[in-house]
Amino acid sequence: MKRLVSLILAAGLAASSAAAAPPPPAAAPVASIDPRVKFKDGERYLRDLSDGLGVPRESICKEMSQYDCFSDAFRIVLGGVEGPNLLVNSPLEQAPLTAPIAVDRVALHACTARVDLDVATPAQARLLKGGGRGAPGAAWKQATTLRIYDAVLRRAPTADETRRLVAFYDEVAQGRPARSPEVKRDWVILGCFAAASSLEAIFY
Amino acid sequence: MNGNWSRRGFLRSAGVGGALMAAGGLTPAQAAEQQRERAKNPRFLIVLSAFGGANLVDSFLSVRETESRNGQVVNAYPDSLVQTLGDFRAIDLQSKRIGAIPASFTANQSNFVKAHGRDMMVVTHTGTSVNHFVAQMRSINGNAAWKGRTLQEATALTYGAGYPIPNVHLVNGTGFTEWGSDTSLPLYAYGERAPTPNLWPLSLDGYKGVKGAPARDLFERARKLRNEQIDPNSAFFGTFGQSERIRHWNTLRGESLRGVEASDLITKLMLFPDSPAMPLAAHGLSGSALGQKVRDAFPNYDFDPLESQAALAFLLLRYGVSVTVTLGPDGGAVFKKGVSLGSGEGLGEGGLVNTPISFDFSHQANREVQALMWDRVLRTADRLITLLKSEEFQDGESFWDHSMIYVATEFGRTRRRPSGAMTFGSGHDLNNGSLIISPFVNGGRVLGGVDPDTLLTYGFDPETGRPELGRNMTEPEIYSGIAHALGIDTPGAGLPDMRAMRRRA
């Protein structure tokens, strides 16, 4: 929590000084000459999301409100094994066609569950916090972006990443009442979803 | 986004490019046109795997005791149990036990022959391995007969272009669903796992049925943001973006994902009706329009793995999702719904639906297990055929008119038995044969034969089908016969012409 607060403060300071002196662009990443990554199997992925979003593992993703997304629904598709009944003793070597769809589904479930908790118990909110009754300002969007990245990817967003997600708010709000709490809710869920289903969240 | 990031381009090159190589030297335009034409008039391959050795001398090639000079010590049956129906034999067996297990059952083979004998063809062959997994793989790749590609992959390659998921594997953990060793094929030709048929349709749409999610169009915008801005500009991608796994992932996220979701397969393939177990309506979903029909055919779909596989297999073909499906009993015992063990009274009639390790439980009780498991496989095939016959494909032709069921198995079982024994165990034997059911095959025929004294099968002339004592058909020959009956071109493969296996031989 301390880390989150300090990150928010840092983001606020950065935002306030942005007009005077834009931060220098981050150095371009160096491409690995041997880029080997591992796919987080579904259980690891769900535990990471559970930990980051503060939603209990057993309730973070339920299909039909009752079947666990990993152990009941997408275990093999998401790289798990199940020896006793399915005789699948090792993870699939290549992600199947349905894996990205299942990951999107799991991420959407998890982010919706988190934001629903935020709405139900604002005092314990993790992502959707404050913002007042009117249309939210830039500072709130930036702080929320920071909260999303911190919870899902365990790092602060870059300036470009913040700019992109903040700009996405306008897409979500398009054609809808500016004061609608639904707009904020939808933006937070979808911002969380985009981060939680990103390559960085899925592979390690 | 830079030029290297184009998933569409990657898919195109991975897909069509590979297909061209496989098609054997056609220009890209010619190959694409050929694929489109083939996809309009497909042939469907259903691999019904028979794990553990479905033995032909316990079914359609059975021999009467009085026909054999060794009738008491080889696996010849009492004369009264063996029926002759055209070219085929059949065993209908009732028993109160399966070896040491008190489990009463009634098994029937003759009904299937009477109903589908015209489309049945039995071919003899001798395999090259009695290792389960190896022999399973060889039953579908013909012991690497054609660059190592499986029959399912060859079918998907020939007819599957444009189908959302051409090749679906419903049974797991077996060599029957192992990918072939030909890595040059387009991605769509390889088998897609559908490990839990009842819930698998939920993995065919990333959005539908997620309660409380924002509107779909906003969800799609979030995907676009992720795909086009967040991911390609991330430091993670900059460092690891050329990883094979990430490239593959991005390929899947592209057109193939959109094709699957656009087909609304989450609805079409949903076996369940709205119910407390699957509250579809409460989650904005609904069951398949053909759900009731498949549930009537496979009423135990909700607990019997084979029935759920078969139900989904039908829907995959019927809705134009796939051109080949692989299903079959797996290694687990299945009991009738409501049956529990431990009462001390044994299992009542039909209480055991699937023996542990399926046909391979013949190690304990050959005849009982073969009878029960053949009955199970044939019932499944019968219901699938009935469903496929009931649905029109095009121009008055049914789906069955375009289909083949290949009952794939690893090997046969050893033929010896203690003198006069009805219950005995058997081992693995290379010598056996296969059952193939299709309007495309030389139906109503046994190709090859069985020596009544040894109960070993012998082969046939590939051109005429005439039995040839002393000849054993090989795995590549059977592979070739199946592939050619399916209308699959095999340029440059050097496969033999097995005209005898085709209906219009």
Image (spheres, coloured by chain):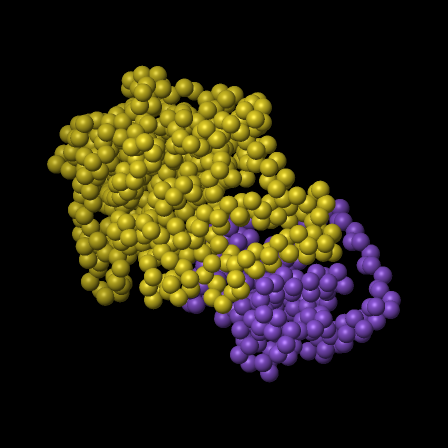
Taking the image as shown, residue B227 lies to the left or right of residue B277, namely: right
Look at 72% across and 78% down and name the residue there.
A5
Q: Residue lying farthest left?
A: B80
Look at 23% across and 66% down and name the residue there.
B343
Question: Between A35 and A141, which is closer to the camera in this rendering?
Answer: A141
Task: Tell me if residue A158 comes above or below residue B192 in the rendering.
Answer: below
Q: Residue lying farthest right?
A: A21
Look at 59% across and 40% down and name the residue there.
B11
Chain letter for the yellow part: B
Question: Between B143 and B308, which is closer to the camera in this rendering?
Answer: B308
List x then y, in percent, for residue B280.
38, 62
Look at 54% across and 27% down and name the residue there.
B31
List x then y, in percent, for residue B291.
32, 52
Taking the image as shown, residue B109 lies to the left or right of residue B137, namely: left
Q: Quadrant of the C terminus of chain B?
A: top left
The shade of chain A is: purple
Q: Is residue B474 visible?
A: no
Q: Is residue B50 visible?
A: yes
List x then y, in percent, for residue B271.
35, 54
Count of numbered tags: 0
Task: Tell me if residue B465 comes above or below residue A16 in the rendering.
Answer: above
